[in-house]
Structures are given as structure tokens and as C-alpha cells.
Amino acid sequence: MELLVGNKGWLLFTTFILLLGGCSGRPAPAPVISASNPIVINDYKAPLVTPKSVTVKNGDTLYSIAWYYGLDFQTIAQNNKLSSPYNIFPGQKLILLNSPARANKGERKNTVKNKIKQKKINVKQDVDHDKKQAYGESSGTKNTHPTGKRNYADNVGKWVWPAAGKVIATFSVSEQGNKGIDIANRVGSKVVAAASGKVVYCGDALRGYGNLVIIKHTDEYLTAYAHNSKILVKEQQWVKSGQKIALMGSSDSDRVKLHFEVRFKGSSVDPLHYLPTKNNNK
């Protein structure tokens, strides 16, 4: 206490007490936001650990590979010069990440080819509209193809809940967080398509998903339905919004539930932003 005798000592002591009181008056520490994962919108970007290439295994499809690595299937198709319906085979090597130099070289090469082709086209000649488009099967605003083949819609017309039950886990933006929502119910409860589209994957090759169904709705939106006890649809099958596609189960899971995800151009987005406010699925 002798150190505090005198005006200077008393002033230092008073200042210390005031600072201590100000700190203790804070209700909670200021929140810390990681600069490496800023929360801008409720979307999840896959971590940048994707290999440059992968080898196709039995049961793989372009869609399942894109889903597993959080990539847009159209990007992989373009990297490997694949056109619809994107057939791949076991043992095939697929480029997932294209180097900038290679991409620029490919763009220049395609530009030259396009210019040469353009010169050969007669302006009075009709363009063949029946030819399939590369990297997407939708050629216009109509949902019917001139040849009678079915096309994907330009937009998702109607979203419905994929299953009845209680939501036990919601979407998270963290790197290791839930990339969708989990709905709990009894074994055998029906699982339905959240929107109309085409089944592009059925199987159990993706670790952590169990019996999985992936549906393509547009060239941008896909949905996934995991941990099913039984799958009731086949690949390449068209389904309608609300149509039964599987039975709920616990395959590759510690409990009975449906794990449901929505992907937009390869990135996981919060399903609750698309589904109706109330779950009317019975």
C-alpha cells in the first residue's frame, strides 16, 4: 500500500479499478468470425481438398462423383468433354479440377473451331434443333422435346417435404457441419421426391449416405435422399413431385432417419429455404 501513497499512486490505482469494472460489465465476449469461412449466405462450399482427378469405380455416375466432391456436374463434364447423357465407365479417369493454363488453351482451341464451323454454315440453312445440347438437356423453355424426348424444366415448379416426421438436425455452414436436414420417423416410412425430375443415381457407393437416391430437377438443382431401407425407383426414371421413391431406414446411420440435401450448382444450400413452412407430408 505504500506504493500507492501520493497523488500519482492514487491515480494509477483508480484507473486500474475503473478498467476492471468496465471489463466485468460486459455481458459476453465479442463474437469471433473466422475470416477463412465468412458467413455471407446460408450456403456451404466444399473445402478445397478435391483431387485433380479420380478413377471411376463400379456403380459411379457423373452425378454421384460430383455430389461426393461438392462440384457442379456440368464442370466435370466440360473438363472431360462429356455430353449428355454423360456416360462413364469403370477405370475411366475423370479430371475434376482443370488447370488455368489448360482451360485457357482449350478455350482458344474451341474458339478457333467455332469460327471455322461458323464460316461453313449457310445463313439460309436451318439449324438442327433436335441435336442434344452438351452439358445440359434443356434446349428451351418448353418441357417437351421436338422429338418427343422429355426435358428438364427451367425452374423447380413446386417443392414438397421429402418425408413426414421430426426435424432432428438442421443445415450448418461449418466445414464439418450438416449439409442438409435430418428427418426422423419409423422404419418403412415413405420418402418422396421433393420436386419433379429425373433419378440420376441409386446405390450405396457414397460413404456415409447408405442407400442413396439423387434426383436432378434442373441443370442447376439436385436433391439427395440418404439412409433408405429400400429404394423404389431406378436410374433414368422420371418422377413427379411427391412421388414415393424410397422407404426410410438406417443404412450407414446410427438411427432411422432421412438425410435430405439440396445442391445448387454443386454447392449445398439450406433445404428449409425451399421447402414449405409446414410439413404436410403424411
Image (tube, grey):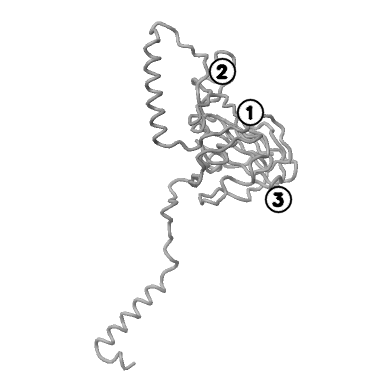
Residue 91 rendering spot, x and y as whole percentages: 61, 33
Q: CA distance from mark 3 to mark 1?
A: 28 Å
Amino acid at circle 3: Arg
In this view, which residue lies farthest toward the bottom? 2
Q: Residue at x 41, y 54 (%)?
A: 35
* Whether residue 24 is situated above or below residue 220 in the rendered picture: below
Q: CA distance from mark 2 to mark 3?
A: 41 Å
Is 210 positioned to the left or the right of 55 in the image? Answer: right
Closest to the observer, 151 or 241: 151
Q: Residue at x 25, y 86 (%)?
A: 8
Q: Residue at x 64, y 26 (%)?
A: 236
Amino acid at circle 1: Lys
Of the residues under marks 3 and 1, which one precedes in the sequence? 1
Residue 182 rendering spot, x and y as whole percentages: 63, 47
Amino acid at circle 2: Thr
- The residue beneath circle 1 is 240
Q: Residues within 10 Å of mark 2 (few under 14, many from 20)?
A: some
Do callouts 2 and 1 mark residues in contact (Cβ within 8 Å)? no
Residue 4 rendering spot, x and y as whole percentages: 30, 90
Closest to the observer, 17 or 78: 78
Residue 255: assigned label: 3
Residue 167 rendering spot, x and y as whole percentages: 63, 48
Q: Residues within 10 Å of mark 3 (few under 14, many from 20)?
A: some
Residue 144: assigned label: 2
* Whether residue 37 is situated above or below residue 62 in the rendered picture: below
Q: CA distance from mark 2 to mark 1?
A: 15 Å
